[in-house]
Structure formats: structure tokens, C-alpha cells
């Protein structure tokens, strides 16, 4: 599984992270059906899941006039994935994490999602 595809699958799985009954293993099994998850996919899913509180604090520290609770789930999930990749996954360059989040925002978000995500993540790199 290519990294871009893994990120998209991770987004689809983690989109339900705020649901109280979220179980990453069950969600991954249901989405992938008979396919085996890549190590990268598992790293993103479990990394975001296990570090959610710290990741959310990093995101909130870089939001202007917004709170994490006000964000749409698409933007919140993409910011979580990119933040995980930028600060917890040393193999992903910051620019790649940002660009991949923007690309997924163009697919799953609205016309302003990509710019918003770029703005928040760019502040994290300064």
C-alpha cells in the first residue's frame, strides 16, 4: 500500500475518532476487509489514537480565533494526521505531511479546507 493511499485509509478510519465507541482495530478491519494494513497505516492510526490529547493541544496552540471543538471533523482529522506525521513520525518531512493533508482536504473538505489546513500546519513549522 502506497503512503498516499495509507493516509487516505487512515483518514477514513480516524474520521470517527471522536465517537465514543471508536476501536481502531475494528475500524481498520472493517474498512480494509481482506487487505492487510501496511505498517505506515497502522503507525498513523495507532499513533494518532494514542497521542490524540497531545496532538490536539499542538493544534489548538496554532489556531487563531478558533477552538478545536469548532472545527469540522474533516479538518480536525486531517490536522491530527499531519501533526502526527510532523512531530511523531521522523520519516515524514514536514512539507510532505502538509501537502498530503492539503490534497486530502481537496477531496474530502470544502473549497476553503486546504487553505485553512495549510495555514495551521505552516504555523507549526515556524
Image: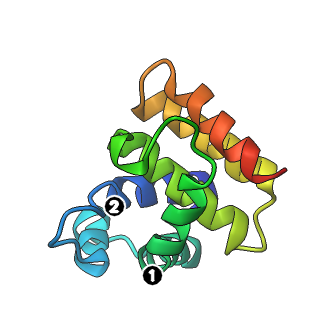
Residue lying furthest right: 126
Residue lying furthest top: 111
The residue at the point 43 percent across, 52 percent down is 77
Q: Position of residue 31 (x, y in %)?
A: 27, 62
Instruction: From the image, tell me which residue sits under label 2.
Output: 13
Q: Position of residue 51 (x, y in %)?
A: 50, 77
Question: By what rule are the colours in the image chosen?
Answer: rainbow
In the image, taking residue 92 as reference, residue 102 lies left or right, namely left
Distance between the Cα atoms at labels 2 and 1? 14 Å
The residue at the point 64 percent across, 45 percent down is 100
Task: Assign a secondary structure to mark 1.
Answer: helix
The residue at the point 69 percent across, 52 percent down is 97
Task: Assign a secondary structure to mark 2.
Answer: helix
Instruction: From the image, tell me which residue sits under label 1.
Output: 50
Q: Earlier in the sequence, mark 2 or mark 1?
A: 2
Q: Position of residue 1 (x, y in %)?
A: 55, 63
Amino acid at each position: 500500500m502506497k503512503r498516499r493511499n495509507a493516509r487516505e485509509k487512515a483518514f477514513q478510519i480516524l474520521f470517527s475518532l471522536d465517537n465514543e465507541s471508536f476501536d481502531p482495530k475494528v475500524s481498520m478491519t472493517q474498512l480494509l476487509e481482506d487487505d492487510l494494513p501496511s505498517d505506515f497505516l497502522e503507525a498513523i492510526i495507532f499513533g494518532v489514537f494514542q497521542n490524540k490529547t497531545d496532538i490536539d493541544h499542538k493544534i489548538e496552540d496554532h489556531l487563531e480565533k478558533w477552538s478545536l471543538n469548532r472545527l469540522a471533523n474533516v479538518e480536525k482529522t486531517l490536522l491530527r494526521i499531519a501533526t502526527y506525521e510532523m512531530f511523531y513520525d521522523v520519516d515524514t518531512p514536514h512539507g510532505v505531511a502538509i501537502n498530503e493533508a492539503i490534497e486530502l482536504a481537496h477531496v474530502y473538505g470544502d473549497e476553503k479546507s486546504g487553505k485553512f489546513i495549510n495555514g495551521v500546519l505552516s504555523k507549526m513549522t515556524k
